[in-house]
Image (cartoon, coloured by chain):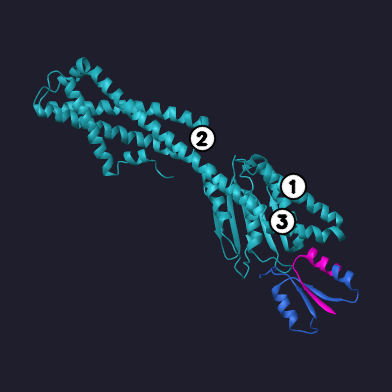
Amino acid sequence: MNVLIIENEPPAAGKIVRLLKEIDKSIKVLGVIETVEEAVNRLQIDPRPDLIFMDIQLDDGL
Amino acid sequence: MKESNITGLLDQKKPFSHIAIIVIASLATFYTVLKQENAGSIVDILSVFILIVTLIEVFIFIALKIFTELNANITGKEFTRIVIKRFILFILICFVASLVIYLIFKYAVTLIAGDDLSMVFSRFRNYELIPWIKTTLGGLVFGAFIFIIIQWQDAMTREQKLREENLIFQNETLKSQVNPHFLFNSLNTISSLIHTQPEAAEQFINNLSMVYRYILENGQKDSVPLQSELNFITDYFNLHKIRDEEKIILDINAQDAGQFRILPVSLQILLENAIKHNIASRENQLRISIYTEDEQIVVRNNLRRKSTQIVSTKLGLKNLAERVRLTCKTDLVIEESKEFFTVKLPLIK
């Protein structure tokens, strides 16, 4: 399963990655994105993630 | 500063004060006439009345000139010292003014009556000196009484206002600090760090406890050494830094910090505002500079407002500005250009 994490605080993103790995080692984290702008760009290209973990407030807005 | 009621009454720009003066002068004239066994003519009574009105007007004018500046905030012993000094000055000036007016008046009356002008001064010296001193002193005691009340009222109003502002400020500070969101974020960060970076987690908890400790110990004080406030905001900044890493940068440059004091938790409000309202990312770092400049501390950040409006009551900055005005007697300076947001906060010597 491909997972994308959108979270601007590195410690919080790190924790999600760690928890995901604990649950299932086969989960593939596509990356950690910190801004809205970056997220918009990323979602327009493949591979599309199966699941997104998204924070509600990022560095450049809501 | 709002004028107290009595100051308003004595405001010579308002017709009411003149009406009050005329009433008082009428009473005084009436009293003078009653005391004299051989009541003078209408002209005599009228002239006494005009003299009294003129004297009261002049006394109030002098008193306002001398005492109004005192409304600028001065406190404690210095205040008493200045009041006494000015009071003595006031009495001297009033005596001189009264003497001049009285003599001019007498000359004028004598001239109108067609009497010998050369008699005026010797008559004054021989017969009228003691009554003149008595009258002037009486007027002065009356005036002094009113002015002491005015000063006292002003001091009370100022004190009360400051106390109210302090309460609001403390309340706001505590609310923003113990604010559930701040605590929630902090606990989340600890939970994220504790597993993988136990040392960073420990550091974070230390910083957090220092921040709370500072607010508890100093939040209610009138002022703190600038260096303590700088240490405090460094702790506070580190809480953000652990979460945001190199997205925010803080430069503090205050070599002369030892000379100054500052309102507690004031820099933190400015720092928090800068972080809250601006975009901070790895590409566009938020750079906050804090430095001293001409007995002021300047907090300046590059301006990159978040596109979405942050929910803000603006109370933080407003309350701070009000508190600065009341405590430091000068205004908080807020400057906004295209690139920078700058706040200049006065320091206390």
Q: In the image, is B166 to the left or to the right of B103?
A: right
Please report the residue visible at 73 percent of the width from the left and 76 percent of the height from the top: A39
How far apart in space, not on screen, are marks 1 and 2 (Cα)?
A: 33 Å
Which percent across, then down, holds residue A36? Answer: 70, 74
The mark nearer the N terminus, 1 or 3, is 3
Number of other residues with Cα within 10 Å of mark 2, as a class: few under 14, some 14 to 19, many 20 or more: few
Q: Secondary structure at mark 3?
A: helix
The stretch of residues the image draws in magenta is A1-18
Q: In the image, is B12 to the left or to the right of A54?
A: left
The image quarter containing residue B150 is top left
Figure chain in blue: A
- Asked if both marks, 1 and 3, belong to the same chain, the answer given is yes
Number of callouts:
3
The front one of B22 and B69 is B22
What amino acid type should be assigned to the residue bearing mark 3?
Leu
| Chain for disc number 1 | B
Please report the residue visible at 68 percent of the width from the left and 57 percent of the height from the top: B180
Q: Secondary structure at mark 2?
A: loop
Q: Is residue B236 above or below residue A18?
A: above
For disc 3, the marked residue is: B183
Which percent across, then down, holds residue B10? Answer: 32, 38
